[in-house]
Amino acid sequence: MSESMIERVERALAIHFSGNRQPCMSGDPRDRLSPLQRRNLSDAARAAIEAMREASDEMVEAMNNQAYYASLSYPRGHIGPGAWSAAIDAALSEHGQGG
């Protein structure tokens, strides 16, 4: 089973704060954390994802541009800000706690 988005952000934060910026370090850096540190890491990962819930104008423009170029090969409409919110909500609900 692949990691949920929250788990991926947790891992990225754990690697970042471990001082070793190499994602290929042996073992899962989260395994070296106390239960309280692990909970704080999970809360930080969730907060980071929640902060991205509302797309900026630039993000919407980038998604629309991407949709336009994709529509040249695959007919689809433009992606609006609701698509980004839905994607973030889906990532947050991977652990049964939707936004």
Image (spheres, helix red, strand yellow):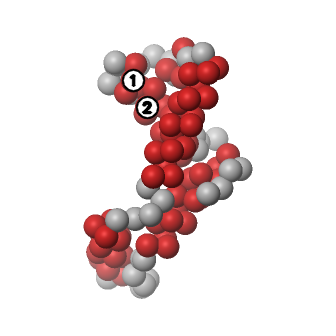
Check the picture and name the quadrant holding the C terminus.
bottom right
Which residue: 60% across, 16% down? Answer: 34
- Label 1 Cα neighbours within 10 Å, binned few <14 / some 14-19 / many ≥20: few
Image quarter in which the N terminus is found = top right
Rendered view: 11 above or below 45: above
Identify the residue position indicated by label 1 in the image.
17
Q: Which residue is mark 2?
A: 13
Q: Position of residue 21 (x, y in %)?
A: 32, 24
Secondary element under disc 2, as helix, strand or loop, is helix
From this view, report whether residue 54 is shown above or below residue 30. below
Residue visible at 61% across and 21% down in the picture: 36
Question: The disc labelled 2 sits on which kind of residue?
Answer: Leu
Percent position of residue 12, x then y: 43, 33
- Do residues under tags 1 and 2 come within 8 Å of each other at their CB atoms? yes
Q: Is residue 29 visible?
A: yes
Q: Is residue 31 visible?
A: no
Instruction: Tell me the residue at 64%/20% (across/down).
Output: 35
Indicate left or right for 62 with 15 as reference: left
- Side of 29 where 68 appears, left or right: left
**67 and 45: which one is in front?**
45
